[in-house]
Amino acid sequence: MDDVIPWLTLARAPALHAGQLADWFAQRRTPPDLLGDAAACTALGLGAGTVRSLFHPDRAAIEHDRRWLVAAPRRRLVTWGTQDYPPLLAQIPDAPLVLFLEGDAAALSLPQLAIVGSRNPTALGRDTAVQFARHLGRAGLAITSGLALGIDAAAHRGALDGGAKTVAVVGRGLDAVYPPENAGLARRILESGGAIVTDVPVGIGPLRHHFPRRNRILSGLAIGTLVVEAALQSGSLITARLAAEQGREVFAIPGSIHNAVARGCHRLLRQGARLVETVDDIFDELAPILGNLSSFVSAPASNDMGRVDARLDKDYEILLDALGFEPASLDAIVSRTGLQTGAVASMLLILELDGRVQQQPGGLYSRRLAGR
């Protein structure tokens, strides 16, 4: 790009998106043309605040954006209408005009599934996100999420464990990582050939109103969105709603009726989301789309998620069946199995060392998913 300044000016104009300028660009006009034509801005119906920002830009902030772009080789400005702009995202009505990107721009155009969920998941929910991301990544899908704590971070890690590319869509400028606890994960994403992307200019922090606009990019990049765990008041439900409005598939994993972070998934299922128990449920639903992407994606040959992978002594099988995947106390397990307390405690220790059971806060126990 010869001159990024006009695009950076558009990027900092509030409430401006590609849908508003589609006709303008269809006439082969350019950002400099727009910035020199106040009458055209009025004719396009742009708001007063938007027009004011276009004709009286914060030049120091724009220069700060430009310096950030040239300070490292993996930084890019991906602009509307260019070859690097992801085609699925271009289809949404309020697509961003500009994407700030660090990493590999080609990752944005890979077939990808978004995985989102609670920032405070259960241990089982975190394991589930890791497992699904790993399996889907090994099958050839890139995994998209929001780099938040909880399910988002687990999805990125699962994709990396499966050798897949992963894209992090964030709600702040790329001059810093948010939350800072995920700085190491962000480095892994970049080192693996993935990308971190936003439409928020440099130097702007993670403000509350940024996240709905972040979520429409997250869902817009993907062929579908999988919600692993979500409370009723959750940004993940916003992402799922946006995915549905964009004509993309929405998937949800059911959970216990006693689990507060399963209630958002149950609401989605009542609203028509696809119920998911295994990765095959996702591939079966996406088969018509993935058929056109066969050079990238192939459904896994087998799916052992959630199954015990070796024969166990009968008492151990009874214990695991009684335990299930929801956390339970030692007393509850004794009551369900009819086994002696000492025997159950010993068996739980052995199963924990074997990676089949994990302790939860409060002295509770739950099963691990196979492969964890």
Image: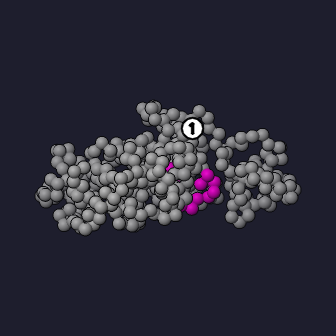
At label 1, which amino acid type do we have?
Asp
Please tell me which residue is depicted at 48% across the width and 48% down the height of the picture. Answer: 192
Decide if residue 195 is on the left or right side of residue 116.
Answer: left
Please tell me which residue is depicted at 31% across the width and 50% down the height of the picture. Answer: 78
Is residue 241 visible to the viewer in this orientation of the structure? Answer: no
Q: Is residue 237 magenta?
A: no
In-front residue for pair 255/319 = 319
Q: Residues within 10 Å of mark 1 (few under 14, many from 20)?
A: some
Q: Is residue 27 above or below residue 229?
A: above
Percent x, y of residue 267: 53, 53
Decide if residue 162 is on the left or right side of residue 38.
Answer: right
Q: Secondary structure at mark 1?
A: helix
Please tell me which residue is depicted at 45% across the width and 32% down the height of the picture. Answer: 295
Decide if residue 59 is on the left or right side of residue 111.
Answer: left
In-front residue for pair 135/193 = 193
Percent x, y of residue 13: 26, 61
Is residue 176 visible to the viewer in this orientation of the structure? Answer: yes
In-front residue for pair 171/70 = 70
To which residue does mark 1 refer?
280
Please tell me which residue is depicted at 57% across the width and 62% down the height of the picture. Answer: 120
Q: Which residues are magenta?
A: 114-127
